[in-house]
Image (cartoon, rainbow, N blue to C red):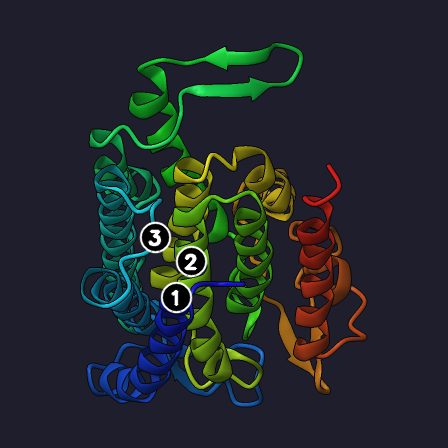
Amino acid sequence: MLPLTFIISLLVAFTVSLWSVPWLIRFLCRINLVVKDLHKEGTPLVPRSGGLAVVIGFMAGIMSFLFFFTFVARDQAWLTESSLTLLFAAVLTIFIITFIGFIDDLLMVQSEQRRLPGGLRQWQKPLLTLAAAIPLMVVNAGTSILIVPFFGHVDFGLLYPLLLVPLAVVGAANMVNLFAGFNGLESGLGLIYLASLGAYAYVHERHLAVIIALVTFAALLAFHLYNKVPAKILSGDSLTYLLGAVLATIAIIGNLEKATVIISLPFFIEFFLKLRGKFKMQTVGYLKQGKIHSRYTQVYSLPHFFTRTGKFTERQVVYFMYMIQLFFAVLIWFV
């Protein structure tokens, strides 16, 4: 059973995130950070960059956990000084990358409103997200010994914090960002893989990974209530970057690289499908008689397997994607 401090942290994260979303919707509308919802009749304008609400809830949950540990229940023997250092580094990484995602959202929306190419350039995204990996790098998070297929245990030494950690953060952030364009898709997928990884980390006693996964889950659940079809607010890069950083952080500080790679296989599949289209083909389709139709006859994204038939609503396409993610979320327990 989860300690009381964990449970309180989850409740705080959920409540603060739930309170933040309506405020964030009004704020984003006020600053005109809105985009067209392409899968709705009349393409209504919807605020974008919901990751801000999630990171607020996440920060509140983590701070409440530290408060109760410090002043109320100091019974977590695993929470040593070094563990606290890792936790603060992870929180800083997640906060920085969410801010970068928000900047990208801001630039992207402004450029769309002016009908100009905009947002962060492709070479700028990995460069800026690289900055978010620095906190984990400087504290030498994780263990340098990994199990590599066909090679067994390999000690990467300094290559782990200086090369593999930044690659993981940058890769995961941009990988999760591949899935975008459908109401509730990014947040729903996140709920599935965070719940599974959180439980997996708990069973294997990776306590820091548990708190990060489940606090993010709680904050994300509150946001999902507003993001599911029909969405009142869209995820934006601020959320996809956040979720990618959380995945990388769980893998690194929880030493759960294998489980994280397996649960992320839908994103790897999406990457190669996008590569097939030279990253020029859009995931989103168009609405016709209540159904979502792909813009292409070929498959350049996982949702295209469903939208190319023209037989499914947006909600149904999203649920199909949930089922794919759920399969890999269960698979980690058997591989």
* Precedes in sequence: disc 1 or disc 3: 3
User: In whole angstroms, how far apart are the C-alphas of marks 1 and 2?
Assistant: 7 Å
Asked whether residue 95 is in view, the answer is yes
Q: Position of residue 314 (x, y in %)?
A: 66, 77
Q: Quadrant of the C terminus?
A: top right
Please, what secondary structure does the residue beneath circle 2 have? Answer: helix
Q: Quadrant of residue 308?
A: bottom right
Q: Quadrant of the N terminus?
A: bottom right
User: In whole angstroms, how far apart are the C-alphas of marks 2 and 3?
Assistant: 31 Å
Q: Residue at x 52, y 44 (%)?
A: 279
Which numbered mark, 1 or 3, is in the foreground of this view?
3
Q: Amino acid at mark 1?
A: Gly
Count of picture labels: 3
Q: Amino acid at mark 3?
A: Gln
Q: Position of residue 251 (x, y in %)?
A: 46, 39
Mark 2, residues whose alpha carbon is within 10 Å: few (<14), some, or many (≥20)? many
Circle 1 residue: 236
Residue 240, which numbered label? 2
Q: Residue at x 37, y 83 (%)?
A: 18
Q: Quadrant of residue 290?
A: bottom right
Residue 76, which numbered label? 3
Q: Quadrant of residue 140?
A: top left
Q: Position of residue 295 (x, y in %)?
A: 66, 63
Compared to residue 295, the image places residue 48 above or below, namely below
Badges 1 and 2: C-beta atoms under 8 Å apart? yes
Q: Amino acid at mark 2?
A: Thr
Residue 316, which numbered label? none
Compared to residue 46, the image places residue 239 above or below, namely above
Q: Residue at x 53, y 57 (%)?
A: 194
